[in-house]
Image (cartoon, rainbow, N blue to C red):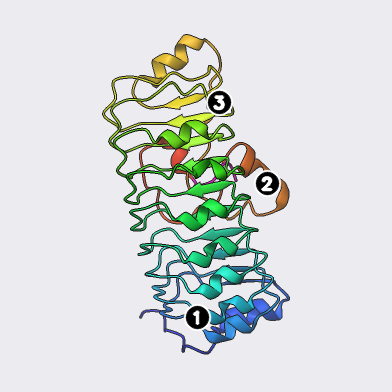
Amino acid sequence: MGIAESTPDELPSEAEEQLRNGEQQLELSGRRLRRLPSAVCALSRLQKLYVSGTGLRELPEEIEELRELRILALDFNKLERLPDGLCRLPRLTRLYLGSNRLLALPADFAQLQSLRCLWIEGNFLRRFPRPLLRLVALQSLQMGDNRLRALPAELPRMTGLRGLWLYGNRFEEFPPALLRMGRLHILDLDRNRLGGFPDLHPLRALRVFSYDHNPVTGPPRVADTVFLVGEGAVERMAERDEPTPQPPPRRPARAFEDEEEEDLLIGSGGCRTLGPPGSSLGALEAAPGLGT
């Protein structure tokens, strides 16, 4: 017998128990929910809301009433658009939107000025959403498995960005704007259509560069401190005759959600694990962040 679908206005009994225990988080993942129960939006003190893999098709505008929300997981659903109300969550720091049906982001998305980590992989984005360019505090951006062919010249405006995942898109040339992203720590361009690379020494802070499964014949020119993943990378790393660091994972992990571990995520490696790994990068497949 399948799980019963909740009515649009009611909270599941398990959710009510969570809240009675004084928790400031709500776990609804895995249930059958085409629409978020309206009762959820009345939980004004809620800080973490997980609604992953429920079949969710829409969000109410009233979601903006969750003024204390820090973490919102909406991945593995059927969302085709986001309401403007979602853009009015002043404390939101992590947003999981992967594996939905999004074609774009609302213009008001730029209001999410507290956002530090955004996962929007596995959607239908053909163009880089321009509202993101105004999120200067964003540190981790996961845009793998979309349909991007180019990046805007204004990308370096995102001065806080430390990790950028662009695997599984449709880049045929290395985006020039990336050469001016001197603060990036992690750059993933696995599974694109790149035939070569410029000299990547201008990326002075780069720690990990993944370029596997592209039609290239060898590794790019990078500083000796960069961990490489791709054609010819093993030989290049061996030439350095030094221990190679463990690359950070690619998929996010919920376990690391306090501030100290978030610093590790942003500075050196991992995030939150939900759903099966989506590529062939070994350790890089375990989670989409910089190191939860």
Q: Amino acid at mark 2?
A: Glu
In the structure shown, which secondary structural element does the residue marked by tag 3 occupy? loop
Q: What type is the residue that disc 3 sits on?
A: Pro
Query: Which residue is under mark 1?
Result: 60
Q: Position of residue 238 (x, y in %)?
A: 46, 13
Q: Where is residue 66? Give x, y as percent.
A: 64, 75
Residue topped by disc 2: 261
Q: Most prominent secondary structure in the magenta stretch?
A: loop
- The residue that disc 3 covers is 245
The amino acid at mark 1 is Pro
Question: How many marks on residues?
Answer: 3
Cα gap from disc 3 to disc 2, whole angstroms:
19 Å
Task: Determine crowd level at label 3: few under 14, some 14-19, many 20+ residues with C-alpha closer than 10 A.
Answer: few
Residue at screen point 60% across, 42% down: 159
Q: Nearer the viewer, residue 263 or 175?
A: 175
Q: Nearer the viewer, mark 2 or mark 1?
A: 1
Left or right of residue 24: residue 111: left
